[in-house]
Amino acid sequence: MVIMALDHTRDYFSNFGHEPTDLAFASTGMFFTRWITHYCAPVFVFLAGCSAHLAQSSKKTLKQTATQLLTRGLWLVLVEVTIVRLGWAFDIDYSIVFLQVIWALGCSMILLSGLIFLPLRLILAIGLVIVFGHNMLDGIKAQQMGAYGNLWEFLHQQGPVKYGNGNTIMVFYPLIPWVGLMPLGYCFGAVMKMPEAQRNRWLYGIGGTATILFIVLRYINIYGDPAYWHAQTTLHRTVLSFLNTTKYPPSLLYLLMTLGPAITALPLLEQLQGPAAQFFTVYGRVPFFYYVLHIYLIHSIAQLVGIIEPQTMIKGITMHPGFALPVVYAYWITVVLLLYYPCRWFMRYKMSHKKWWLSYI
């Protein structure tokens, strides 16, 4: 949750006018500022599926879990096109709507609400086929599909979908393979229920295998990502090219690169205690609340800076001329700290009040 805010702070405050992973322009610092945030969305979607499994197995029937997944998924899609969209744009002209990670989470929950009635092995197989096979579809373009082109952009090709009289839906997160990743997370919940020693062996095995598979497939440079890596002028820039996998939609190699190390780190993160662990846990216990607040806060600060220093900041998601990376990091830390006490208050409120609607916020 904290790392995610870095990416969005960069969106609003950076003076960099190119894609942050474009090696023709990006510095190593800018590349890794963007690259480290690649871990956020896959882990969110994967662990959301895991949470659904743990919730179902501990307290709820399959029907109750399915109902909650369905209603929460519909709620998230609604929030994406209303509250979240307003936070990004600060205007009520809804002729342009953004579909991003909240939309992908919501639709994945809706699909998972039906899949959970299937045997766990079949759910696992469906998830693996989608995640490992979807890059076979990379050559299919919406322009080739005629009347079905818009549907393909919702499913597997990032881009604008025009409708009505000048209205646009910007599909930043096509649904494939996100809708396959959450079922894998649901199956992963069975691993998280194991005794600690057995669980850790599985975590190291799954995470290590995914990481090694990423390295091998990426080195071969044949399948798993539409953008191949290339040797650069220096070794460390070649490493950046090797790591520069595709997020929209997330390639197989992108998912292996992020989820492999994340799963491997789980046994270590589970042992963390003390003030630092308590500090970060606050944000993790109120993820939706934090997500919405951090967008509004970052955008508000950007607007305020634009008023105070009109030559430094202009309105938009990517600001130009904006600031260098050290200033971006300073604003990121400021945003995270400002949100700590509101998040801690809401965390305590949720723990002391057992109202049904709190599970949706």
Image (cartoon, rainbow, N blue to C red):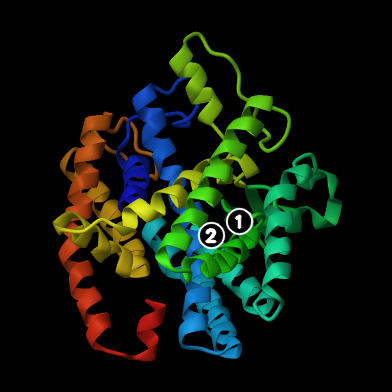
Q: Is residue 123 above or below residue 20?
A: below
Residue extending farthest front:
197
Image quadrant containing the N terminus? bottom left
User: Where in the figure is residue 50, as x and y percent of width and height?
Assistant: 51, 68
Mark with earlier residue (1, 2): 2
Which residue in the structure is indicated by mark 2? 97
Q: Is residue 282 above or below residue 320?
A: below
User: Where in the figure is residue 227, as x and y percent of width and height?
Assistant: 64, 30
Secondary structure under the numbered disc 1 in the rendered image? strand
Circle 1 packing at 10 Å, graded few (<14), some (14-19), many (20+), is some
Question: Can the viewer see residue 24 in this picture?
Answer: no
Q: Nearer the viewer, residue 258 or 159?
A: 258
Residue depicted at x 48% and y 30%: 21
Judged left or right of residue 306, residue 169 is right
Q: Nearer the viewer, residue 360 or 160?
A: 360
Q: As shown in the figure, which amino acid type bears the numbered disc 2?
A: Val
Quarter of the image where one finds residue 321: top left
Judged left or right of residue 87, residue 304 is left
Which residue in the structure is indicated by mark 1? 168
Secondary structure under the numbered disc 2 in the rendered image? strand
User: Where in the figure is residue 252, as x and y percent of width and height?
Assistant: 64, 44
Query: Rounded to the nearest whole Å, what is the CA distance between mark 1 and mark 2?
Result: 6 Å
